[in-house]
Amino acid sequence: MRKWSFYTSKEIKPRGWLKKQLEIQALGLSGNLDIIWPDVKNSSWIGGDKEGWERVPYWLDGFIPLAYLLDDKDMITRAKKYIDAILSFQKPDGWICPCDDDKRETYDTWAVLLIAKTLVVYYECSGDERIPDVVYNVLKNYYELLKDGKIRLYDWGKARWFEGFIAIDFAYKRCRESWLKDLAKILKEQGLDYNESIPLWKKPLNKWRFETHIVNIGMMLKSEAVSCEILGEEYTDNAEMLHGVLEEYNGTPVGLFTGDECLSGLSPIQGTELCAVAEQMYSYEHLFAYSGENKWAERLELLAFNALPATISDDMWTHQYDQLSNQIACVRFPAKPIFRTNGGESHLFGLEPNYGCCTANFNQAWPKFALSAFMCDGDSIINVLPVPSELKTDNEHIVVETNYPFENSFRYTLEVKNAITFRIRIPSFAVNLKVNGEVIDDKELSFDLVADEKLKFDVSFDVNPCFIDRPHELKSVKCGSLVFSVPVKFKKRMLEYVRDGVERRMPYCDYELIPVSDWNYAYCSDSLEICRKGVGDVPFSSFEPPVTLKTAVRKIDWGYEDGYDTVCAKIPESREPVGDELKIELYHYGCAKLRMTEIPKI
């Protein structure tokens, strides 16, 4: 049975740096795609002539909770405008996607699964009473078409069959009709079994396949957690086994798996698609909610505080398609790109480098992360993510004041009308845990509050920076949930142009990042000194990171990958020092747009 349930944007609000991050997002691409990007502005979903498949549902999936978390009336009105238009085109039989009736058989119904999930998100934010009936009719029509063999899952729908269970669970809780269970069984029967794909994950190829596509895999990790109950199956924590294989053969220091665009092995110069970051985060949120196991929340933090901000510009107007652990330049490849199946512009920061899916889909990552700060189970509440946030319901008001993960002190203020048990998840790496200055040995704090009680207390813990072993006898540096890199200074080259009728102009143009500082270093000291500088107006600033580590390095003859002059060699050509010891500051990975994250220690 599910351990924890999610709250809604009416009940959870971001505070502090997290609110700043969401405000930056609202002022950037996320808050403006319906104004500047034809695939959203003139989408077939709202009667236009542009893309009518995944991009508008993707965008709304993040734009809607962003609007409601910030209580932004203009954004809420714009979201409703899109929902109203989409609902107006729903067919009498329930079909909702922008597709002619005679084209349904060849329409990839991944879009059906996605829009149904997005409508659930809208209902949870808005309470719009039209939505339950709309979702019911979408799913009933989908079931009838699948049951009668008029359509089948193929390609993306086949690879992402489990995404439909968000809406199926939503509908089943309201009507308890057996056909929803039958629909769930059809989806699983026609969908990919990723356990059978494991051999393909162990030896990545320069070949595009649905079974090794990194976004499919990021989504898939939650499949058992979202589907087992309605399928009547036992929960086995299959995701942990799959995660172990993926990490062993394709892992990165920041909890991602390489995939540019399909699984890409353990090389630090292979990339990971941004959509995978957002979807892996969403999977971990559901895995924690279902299992209650802290490992998923800790893995979620690792992605959110490192991989997510690293691949999006400070102003959130541009993003990469692919990020690399060791990324010394982001410039167009004149010939063959380093990526396995992606194009030569994939690591540029831009409007839609390589492909526009990430332009629409990255929007969900921060808002859904914010919505996972608290979860509940009856009269028990847990602070899953100890980030600055507030929970306010009819019964309780809880405020968390903190700059975590940049600092590790927290002030909790609670006020309840009825008795509750309040829990705080403590990360496994926390040491010297204290409550109101008193050392505590527990790894999860629990407080029983009686009716009409008010409680205020402080929590703190320490974290110890350390070197982590990486493949190829390289090291990365970690401090709590933050990974650190040698930052590479850069200058930006702005690229404004029009391609296929889509305009790139400042601030949503493309940018190359050209290195202007050295990067060919090896660590030469065990010392890692934490320097906390405070969180500014841009929490993950590329120029003023809130926390750094000081250490010593020496230059080595690292060299370039064969055939390239903007990509460092996968493994250093030599580990012999060629310079004197230097003291440098390591930047938090999320702040280092150009960086060396996996380097030797000599």
Image (tube, rainbow, N blue to C red):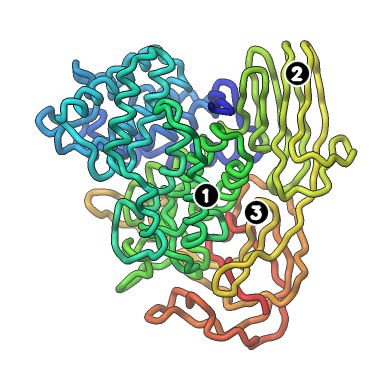
- Quarter-of-image position of residue 425: top right
Report how far apart the C-alphas of labels 2 and 3 lie in the structure. 32 Å
Mark 3 is on which residue type? Leu
| Residue carrying label 1 | 308
Q: Nearer the viewer, residue 234 or 419?
A: 234
Residue 11, horizontal then vertical, whole percent: 59, 21
Of callouts 2 and 3, the N-terminal one: 2
Is residue 589 among the parts visible in the rendering?
yes
Q: Nearer the viewer, residue 35 or 259?
A: 259
Q: Is residue 579 left or right of residue 531?
A: left
Q: Is residue 146 above or below residue 518?
A: above
Instruction: Classify mark 1: residues with Cα within 10 Å, few (<14), some (14-19) or many (20+).
Output: many
Of callouts 2 and 1, the N-terminal one: 1
- Element carrying mark 1: helix
Mark 1 is on which residue type? Leu
Report how far apart the C-alphas of labels 1 and 3 lie in the structure. 12 Å
- Residue drawn 38% across the image and 19% down it: 171
| Residue carrying label 3 | 482
- Element carrying mark 3: strand
Mark 2 is on which residue type? Glu
The C terminus sits in image quarter: bottom right
Residue 413, horizontal then vertical, whole percent: 77, 26
- Quarter-of-image position of residue 253: bottom right
Residue 214, horizontal then vertical, whole percent: 39, 53
Report how far apart the C-alphas of labels 2 and 1 lie in the structure. 34 Å
- Residue drawn 44% across the image and 35% down it: 62
Q: Is residue 249 left or right of residue 185?
A: right
- Element carrying mark 2: strand
